[in-house]
Image (spheres, rainbow, N blue to C red):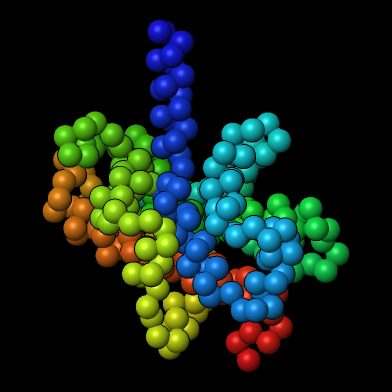
Amino acid sequence: MKHFLISAAMLSLSLAAFGWGQKGHDTVVYIAENHLTDATKAAVDSLFDGKSPVYWANWLDNASHTPEYAYTKTWHYKNVDADRTYDDMPANPAGDAIGAIKQQIEILSNPATTKPEAQLALKILIHVVGDMHQPMHMGHATDLGGNRTKVKFFGRDTNLHSIWDSNLVESAHKWSYTEWQQQLDRLSPEEEVLVVQGTVDDWGRETIEITRDVYNFFQPGLNVSYDQVAYWAPTIEQQLLRGGLRLAHVLNTIYDPSYGK
């Protein structure tokens, strides 16, 4: 029983580090899949041997806990403390989400990249773009991205990071990831252009502003219930849609020379 409880506690801690949870990542990647140009879709299909990118949407969360890919553990987030800005926060020497995204883009854009290298880079990219849009994956290093900020969720003890990974998403809407895409993915072409403007760093700074609002709102000990879920549902919808559209934009820019022309 002792070993079971220890294992359960370790699993809970591990799951708390996941960004958006499975539903959120599936949604981001499925939105992106629906915005790939024909040329990009052909390139992605070739790399993934015909499997949908959604098949790999959550792969990195598990892979990062294996010895082979342990070097990616810090690639799921970029910490910015309360007294720092996005630009003056000291870099994590082990890497972070923003650096990982830029690195994968560089690998995928290089004609000399081998297929196995490109497959791995694409698996990482489709996941980490989702992570960078989850506000607590841009949270404070001082509280491990909200993992040490204790709150309650409908009376149950939990932490700020955990509720943003899955609880708020699942409580906002009981939809499948395809239903999330169908309901959220309704912007006009002109609105989509505005969403994908800017650089990866611009998108990171944008998420940081949301993260600051999250910390101000979710004070330690807060009991998160119906009112809080309703208040933050639009932000969750916004961030999942942004992540999907921006992922598609990045991939189209890499694989389709005619994209945007």
> Which residue is outermost to the top?
1
Q: Is 243 left, or right, of 227 in this rendering? A: right
**Nearer to the camera, 61 or 208:** 61
- Residue 240 picture location, percent across and down: 41, 62
Count every numbered label the image shows and give the total: 0
**Nearer to the camera, 86 or 239:** 239
Q: Residue at x 77, y 54 (%)?
A: 117
* 72 shown above or below 47: above
Quadrant holding the C terminus: bottom right
Q: Is 32 left, or right, of 117 in this rendering? A: left
**Nearer to the camera, 201 or 69:** 69
One can see residue 194 in this view: no
Q: Residue at x 59, y 34 (%)?
A: 65
Which image quadrant for residue 161?
top left
> Which residue is outermost to the bottom?
261
Q: Residue at x 45, y 48 (%)?
A: 22
Quadrant holding the N terminus: top left
> Which residue is outermost to the right?
112
